[in-house]
Structure formats: C-alpha cells, structure tokens
Image (spheres, rainbow, N blue to C red):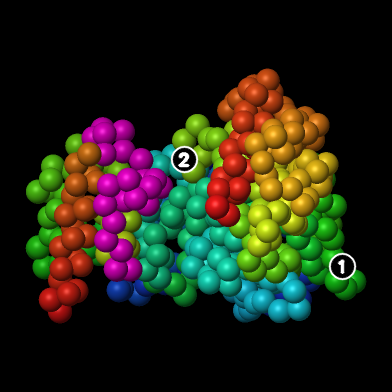
Amino acid sequence: MKPAPLEYLAAATAEEALAALARFDGNARLLAGGQSLVPLLSMRLLRPTAVIDINGIRGLDRIAAGDGVVRIGALARYSALQASAVIRERVPLLAKAVPFVGDRQIRNRGTLGGALCHADPAGEMALCAVTLVARLRIVGRAGRRELDAEAFFQGPYTTALEPTEMLEAVEFPDGAGAEAVVVEHARRHGDFAVVSVAATGLPAPDGSWRWIRIGLGAVADRARYARRASEGLAGTRLQPADVEAAAARCLEDAEPAADVRASAEYRRHLLPILVERALGELARRRR
Amino acid sequence: MSARVTVALRVNGRAYERVVESRRLLVDFLRHELQLHGTHVGCEQGVCGACTVLLDGEPVKSCLMLAPQAHGHSITTVEGLAGRGELHAVQQAFRDAHALQCGYCTPGFLLAAVALADHGVALEGAALREELAGNLCRCTGYQNIVEAIERYLRQAAGGRRDG
C-alpha cells in the first residue's frame, strides 16, 4: 500500500505542466487534489513514471461569473465551491451536489477538475457537468479546445483528454434563479452512489417549468443526461403524472452494471423512484 | 525533478527539512522522517481519517498526500496540541467524556475538532456527526466522541464570546 517509485515535479505554470506531460510522453499524471489519484498510486493500480503537481499554478482555482456562464478553474476545491456565493446563486445544482462528495477532509483537497478527469461513473461532479451541459476547456501544447461534458466522458474512468493535455476550466451555464435537487442512494453517507439523480429547472411565475434537466448517475458507464425525459417536462407544472412519465422515460437511458455496491436490477429498481423523488422535491420548491 | 526531493515545511510551528523519496506519503514522512508517531496510519486509502492532520489549518488526510506536496506548508499534528504538560481543551474534553477506548482514531478526531473550533463552528447532534463523517471509530459507537466534541465546541465558542 505504498506508491511505486515515481518522479515528482511541481509545475508553477500550465506551460510547465504541459511541457512535463510531453516530456514523459503519456507516462505522467497530473496531481491536483489527489483524493482519487493517491489511493490509486498506493494500491499500484496506477504506476506513472512521474506525477506533475499542479497545485502551485496560480489562478487555476478561480471562480468567476460573466457572459452567461460561470467559469470554474480546474483546481477549485470542493470546499471552495461550498463556500462560494457565486456557485450557490448561479450553479445551484453544483452547490447541492458537493455535500454528497466524500467528507470534510476530502472536500478540503479534492478538486472539480480532478473529479471530472477521474471520470468515475458514480461521481457527482460528472453528473452535474453532464446535466448542465458544461463546457470543458482543455489546453494542450498545440492550443486550446472545448468539449461538451457529454463528449468529454467516454466511459468509466475514460475521457477524451489526450495524455499530453490538461483540463483548465469548466464553464457552467449561469443558472441564476434556477431550482436544483440532488438525490442519491448510497450505502453510507459520503460513500459512492449506488444511484444518483440530479434535477434542475427554472420555475416561471405561472407555475410551469422551463430548462428542466435531469441527470442520472451510476446507472451507465458514465453520467447521463436524460434527454427525452427532460424535454418531455418542458412547460409542464411537474404534476404527478408528468413526473411519473419522466421517471419511466429515464429508464431508457439506464444501462446499469452490477458491482460490489449493487446489482444492475436493484439500480433499475431505484432509478425511477429517485427520479420521482427529485422531481417531486423540485416541484415543492415552487409551492 | 527526481525520484528524491527536498521537503521543507513547518510542523507544529517548528521548521524541518528532509530529502525523501518522491513517493513518500505525508503520513509516513511525519512518522518515519520526523518521528512524530501520533499521526496514525489506518486504511491508507483515505477512508478512516486516523491520519488526519491540519494543512495550513484545514483538516486533510495525510495518507492522501505525497510528502513533497507539503513543501512550504504548515502542518499541525496531535503532538502540536498539548502545551507545557497541560492537555489541550479538546483533549481534556475527550478525557472528561470518556471519548476514547483503543485510541487509534483519537488523533484524527482531535484535529478535526480543533479545525471546527478554529473556524468558529459550533455544531451538535446530527450536523456534527455529518461533519465528522471522515473519521471512523471502531470501538466507541461515537456517542462519547460526539459528546466530547460538542462540549469542546461550546466551550470554544464561549471563550470567543468572553474574549
């Protein structure tokens, strides 16, 4: 339970980190919060030649709103997201999801960018990114590119990031005025989700909802945006019949796997229940 | 850049410098390089919280950091709590409430509690238990730990008001 020998490099700038990634030719790992990476090193599930510590890169943790988006630096820690009024007011779904992540110590170190690059299918950050169609800003030596969250995640622990690229920031749509709910079933609080559901939307004065988005966690090889279920709710008042129909539709997007935490069957059983719970709570926010 | 690096940091207010293997975990650095054995190694995968220390005042799990990451930072371990032969208030509260049995998890709980008091957090009951979810205890059933920390946090808040 100790990491294999490795080289350690502290990068002071993104350019330094990228140069080091290139030098190790895909055999280096970026180290942000380390809350997933370090256990993987200790268990020797990963044996990179080098780790490149990006914690010293200034400004990589900045949270700023403008131009209809909230831009969050990849190095923003969970505890910073929790403390941020900008996140609470403009990306309420993220604010609701963070308390489900790990525990206080983990949240003091873990980062948004690290969680997204780790791409755990049960991860709450990936769930939020996919649900809100976040844009991921990626930088490589050849320049910058952007990807939608759905294109970024390619499978369990697999992303579109090249080994010589790094995630720089994530842009969430400015959701000022939106309501958001995250419900999760886990065996213990703070443990990995068996199933998680994110729901968010903008309530209109007449009681109808728009911009409804439902995200599903831990029921496929990556977080899923439940497109059909979400679109079916546009303009509704989230009445019980609407909610029930949406919950049934969410099952179309689920391809759950069996693992140590639950069987696939159990996940299928839980999913519509949690979707109904999430949408029910969203509807109650308005009354 | 090398498989060995110099780590210079402050632990409990004292400056240390050591050259260590890059792969050295912070908890092992504290125990094996600095001979500070109060920080315990539990699960080594960030679950149990026995290795909790304060990094620049914030509780973190020292099995989830490489020692070189602590370069230039300030660490507080359980050895930094008691002063001049007197128990720290949180230690006294644990003693008074009989909040430890085997004691293995205790240093982690103490530091988690100190961080709460330092942040002016005065929680109790379920909210406090949730805040302490990163520290596991296999002996006590938590009742007395929660009681001790409630008592300590109340006392710390009272001290701030009086001060």
Question: Which of A213/B30 is in front?
Answer: A213
Q: Residue at x 12, y 76 (%)?
A: B162
* Host chain of mark 2: A
Q: Nearer the viewer, mark 2 or mark 1?
A: 2
- Residue type of the residue flagged with mark 2: His
Quadrant of the drawing holding the C terminus of chain B: bottom left
The 10 Å Cα crowd at callout 1, few under 14, some 14 to 19, many 20 or more, is few
* Host chain of mark 1: A
> For the residues marked 2 and 1, what is the alpha-carbon distance in whole angstroms?
37 Å
Q: Position of residue B106 (x, y in %)?
A: 26, 47
Q: Is residue B160 left or right of residue A168?
A: left
Question: Which of A203/A122 is in front?
Answer: A203
For this orientation, the residue located farthest to the front is A206
Q: Is residue A211 above or below residue A172?
A: above
- Residue type of the residue flagged with mark 1: Arg
Query: Is A237 one of the magenta-colored residues?
Result: no
Q: What label does residue A112 carry, if any?
A: none
Query: For the residues tagged 2 and 1, is the chain the same?
Result: yes
Prevailing secondary structure class for the magenta stretch in the rendered image: loop
Quadrant of the drawing holding the N terminus of chain B: bottom right
Quarter holding residue A57: bottom right
Counting residues from the N terminus, which is met first, the one under dot 2 or under dot 1? Answer: 1
Kind of element beneath mark 2:
loop
Q: Which residues are magenta?
A: B118-142
Pointer 1: what residue? A145
Q: What label does residue A189 carry, if any?
A: 2
Q: Position of residue A268 (x, y in %)?
A: 69, 26
Question: Which of A76/A245 is in front?
Answer: A245
